[in-house]
Image: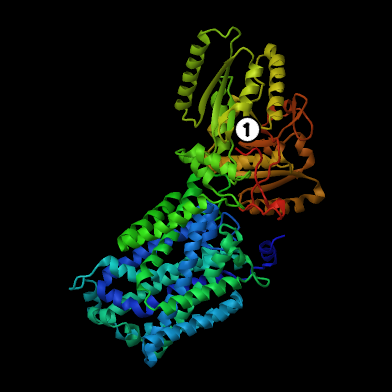
Amino acid sequence: MTTATQSRILEKPSLGTFSGVFTPSVLTILGIILFRRLGYVVGSAGLTQAILMLSLATAISVLTSLSLSAIATNRKVRGGGDYYLISRSLGAEYGGALGLILYVAQAVSVAFYCIGFGEAFVSLIGGTEQTVQLAAALAATTLFGVAYFGADLATRFQFGIMVILIAALASFFVGASQTIDATMLDTAWAKPDRDFEFWVIFAIFFPAVTGFTQGVSMSGDLKNPAKSLPVGTFLAVGVSTVVYLIAMVALAGSLSLTELSTDYDSLKRIAAAPWLIDIGVLAATLSSALASFLGAPRILQALAQDRLFAWLTPFSVGVGPHSNPQRGVLLTAVIAISAIAAGDLNSIAAIVSMFFLVSYGLLNYATYVEAHGGSPSFRPRFKYFHARTSLAGTGLCAFVMLMVDPLASAIAVGILGILYQYLRRTAIPMRWVDSRRAYQFRLVKDGLRELDRLRSSSDRTSDWQPHILAFTASNSRRERVLRVASWVSGGSGLITAVQLIEDENASPATGEARKTAETSLRNELELHQLDAFPLVVAAADLRVATTTLLQTWGIGPIRANTVLLNWFDGQSEDKKQTLSLWYGRLLQRVARNGQHIIVLDAERDEWDRLAVTQEDRRRIDVWWFNDNASRLSLLFAYLMTRTEEWDEATLRVVVPAAQNTQARTEEEITKRLHELRIEANVYVTSEESTSTYSPSRDASIMFVPLHLEGMTPRDPTGQPFSEQLASLPIVAMVAAHGDVRLRIEDETALADDDPATVTTASNQS
């Protein structure tokens, strides 16, 4: 077992929402910009333009927070923050390139904040530029000691800073309440007389909000990242936005715009206790520097543990029960002190800001990829997001980058591109799978080549999709079969409507007959607005043709993994025996080919009943026998709830159990569903009810496992299905061939980890 793996096993996350997310985020946001530059921004731009800047910056924060919350609640978040989330969505190339950039940016940010501390310190006691550098270096050295001994000590240190900041802000707001003047406030809404560059001033203000993702960098130290990250991030954004808004109004109403634009100590002039502002400035710069000191090494550690850059491997080692990245902390200190020694950081400040904007843009884009790709494994607990909002966040970040500094934007994107191409051409040890397969599948631009490349890089996939061959011999039932196929695919897989034509003579007219049948089938699909592709096969021997089709359907990495058939009842008695024999042999061929089977029983009266049932009164029942077929049925039922026709339906898992085990069974299944992020009710029934399936007679549709004994389809009790179907609603009988595990985490395990955590479906496309 590797040292990195041992570190993760020893790790026992201990931070909660307040200490691990809210505190580092809000302390970074309410930092040097608030205390030393907010008055300058308001004075230079006027109150209206300043609030517009705040609104624009907050829009980026909120959109990115929505994306962050969605992607963070869709998987178990490990250490690495933005790097981890992006790499597991967009792949190792993007993630690795951005991870290295983010680490350097945060390491240099330590120097920025420490220099801010040095400037504030010198403004109190006096001194030269060398004094600023000395004070900054001493601050960096002190913070290095705090971060070196772990996040717990640093968190306690941050709590003290939080108290100081609250006191400083209280002093300012109390003083402002006594000095604010309505006339001066009215004047401040107007545009200043002098000219100003909106984007230049915005560039000065924007670093104020870049701290909202600081909590993400601590993801590996959180007890419950899926809960803490959304709550803590939104709370930090909300609180800090309110503070900035009130502070802007208070400043504009207390001092003239001219005074504000020329005096960096405007908060101190207004505060009831000016000395608290001095302490607050020092505390704000230290807190921001400490947050970066905690976040940067954890990004480096996660990057090193993924072994994307061989020379970073030594930094994968963690120390202690919390896997504290002490080597990364040491390297961060070296980079920070070197940057402090360089003195003037203005030349690279814009580029560093661009790196953060790049990360926000890619985080939004990663969420868009996840949501738009339609992968069945994308089941975030956070529901208040949309793919379009994530795409809007990406566009907004790109727009701001270009407006603030096109050259710096080009440099940041160029560095990202160089690292991306390097990783793309490097033999990357793929230790996880990402969501690009689903996205490329939906876009189908360079889809097949990209999908094939991704498949060759790993024999696992995070987004198993049902590629369905729906056999539709009966014209009267074709719509029902294809409609159910579109439901169980949930919009994530390919559906092919297959019609077989028997032609003993293989005459030249066969080709025309096949084209005519395919055109008719395509027209029928368009008429009913069914998401399926038509395929007509004409052959002298339908048995051979069917076997060949099952083995060869598809192109490149796309292969049929599920076959959907109608139940053979409802035919005339003279055809039943022949049809039953053909049907049983077909099921056997499908099973031998390793494909899943769905057998649909949907008579006209059952279908008509479903049509008049209100969507919010529909119910999907899944009979659970804890086997592969049950797990596959649950996945199909969940995918149904992602369609427009079933998104308001109730999903219920029906579990037969002995009387003395029913309570425990219900508790276990409920817990399992929560882990799977599938919202469903649990109904435990007696084992005897399996013979009649009576609890599901009032369901809209039910899923039940199917087993083949010879050529006879039977239920889990061994009874032929034909004896129960007449009294039941629409029934989907499901047979699974191969191992089927529902996903708990999107992160595949290492080779020496417990394989039970690798939860994929078999027969990957």
Mark 1 is surrounded, within 10 Å at the Cα level, by few (under 14), some (14 to 19) or many (20 or more) other residues, namely many
Q: Quadrant of the N terminus?
A: bottom right
Judge whether residue 70 can be spotted in this image. no
Q: Position of residue 603 (x, y in %)?
A: 61, 25
Does residue 147 appear in the picture of this structure? yes
- The answer to whether 297 is drawn above or below residue 519 in the figure is below
Q: Residue 730 at what x, y percent from top left?
A: 63, 31
Q: Position of residue 116 (x, y in %)?
A: 40, 80
The image quadrant of residue 569 is top right
For this view, does 289 lie left or right of residue 720? Answer: left
Q: Which residue is mark 1?
A: 562
- Please, is residue 522 above or below residue 208 in the view? above
Decide: is 624 above or below 504: below
Image color mode: rainbow
Look at the numbered disc 1 and give the secondary structure of its residue.
strand
Q: Residue at x 26, y 78 (%)?
A: 261
Kindly give the residue lying farthest to the bottom in the view shown.
Answer: 125
Q: Amino acid at mark 1?
A: Thr
On the picture, is 77 further left or further right than 709?
Answer: left
Image quadrant in which the C terminus is located: top right
Q: Give the quadrant of residue 591.
A: top right
Quadrant of res 183: bottom left
Q: Is residue 172 left or right of residue 502?
A: left
**In this figure, what is the number of numbered marks?**
1
Residue 267 is situated, as x and y percent measured from the top left of the image, at 34, 83
Give the residue at x 70% y 67%: 10
